[in-house]
Image: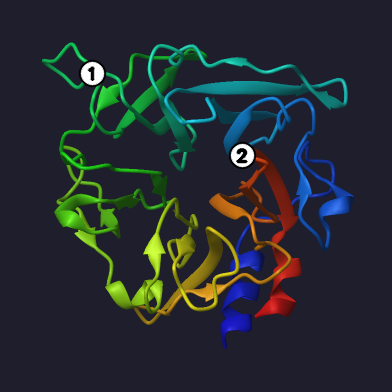
Amino acid sequence: MFRVLLVALVLSFNLQASTLPYFNAAAENQAVEFAPDVISTKDHFEINTVFNQAGDNVIFARCHDDFSMCTMMQSDYKNGQWQAPTALSISGDYLDADPFYSSDYSQLYFVSKRPIPNTTDEAKEVNIWRSTKKNGQWLTAEYLADINSEAMDLYPSLTDSGDLYFPSFRNNERAMYVAKPSATGFTEPKALPSHIYGESGSIGDSAVSRDGNTIIFSLRGRADSVGNGDLYISTKTNGQWSVAKSLGNKVNTAEHEFTPIISPDGQYLFFTRIENGRGNLYQIKLASLLNAQ
């Protein structure tokens, strides 16, 4: 059943030809670095990999090794190769990371330590913000007051229906929350059932699929964990979420894997792996993980 559900996830997307800029034949059956030495480098700590709908622009975050600062970067695919990245216009003054597009790609959700409204100091914890693109330019980001808490709120991801999923450390626990769109913003976030993480599972950056029926979790602490953080998958059937299951050794290693994102065409899983103290960006064909389920 689990295999059938994962097959449905892959087939539910409008799969495109192998001409997409992020197509990589080497990632057919193994995880490989994305755009090595250009986007994923040995000299920096990179996380996140989110593409525009056409796949010819990527936004990611480049961080200090201690995560004291992250800047959202962007790169265009031109003349058959990814170009040297530049800082996103709305980023660079404070820690900014975890970008994710709205379903129509007109808005960018992300986390930031920039001062919240009516304050001047950097926020103590990251909060979720949103910027809208108008005439090709990202507008001043807005603070999502109906989503954020005094604790750390992380890694926003959205379904095509506008449901906002995000991990949060509120209420002295780690949990995945979901808030539905409303006339004025979002409804009150509700925690997903705790069984989804598995016994002793501690959640990190995790993302929902666009159809809202699959979540890829970054978890640590489970008996089947092989590293400091591993990637797991849970699916929703008849309104019920399954216990997250490991994506297997094609993805998970003794290192730390986190920040999962599914490419716009549904073909690839992108994620970060920490190696030698720094994050590198990887991709693998999602269908190749079927054999592990």
Task: Say which residue label 2 marks.
Answer: 277
Q: Position of residue 110 (x, y in %)?
A: 40, 33
Q: Which residue lies at the image location 42% right of the left edge and 47% below the top edge?
A: 157
Q: Secondary structure at mark 1?
A: loop
Query: Image height check: is 50 above or below 131?
Result: below
Q: Position of residue 4 (x, y in %)?
A: 62, 82
In the rendered image, the quadrant that contains the N terminus is bottom right
Q: Are there few (<14), some (14-19), or many (20+) residues within 10 Å of tag 2?
A: few
Q: How is the image coloured?
A: rainbow
Q: Mark 1: which amino acid?
A: Pro
Query: Is 291 situated left or right of 57 in this image?
Result: right
Task: Say which residue label 1 marks.
Answer: 115
Query: Image height check: is 264 above or below 66?
Result: below
Query: Image height check: is 218 above or below 118?
Result: below
Q: CA distance from mark 1 to mark 2?
A: 29 Å
Image mark for residue 74: none
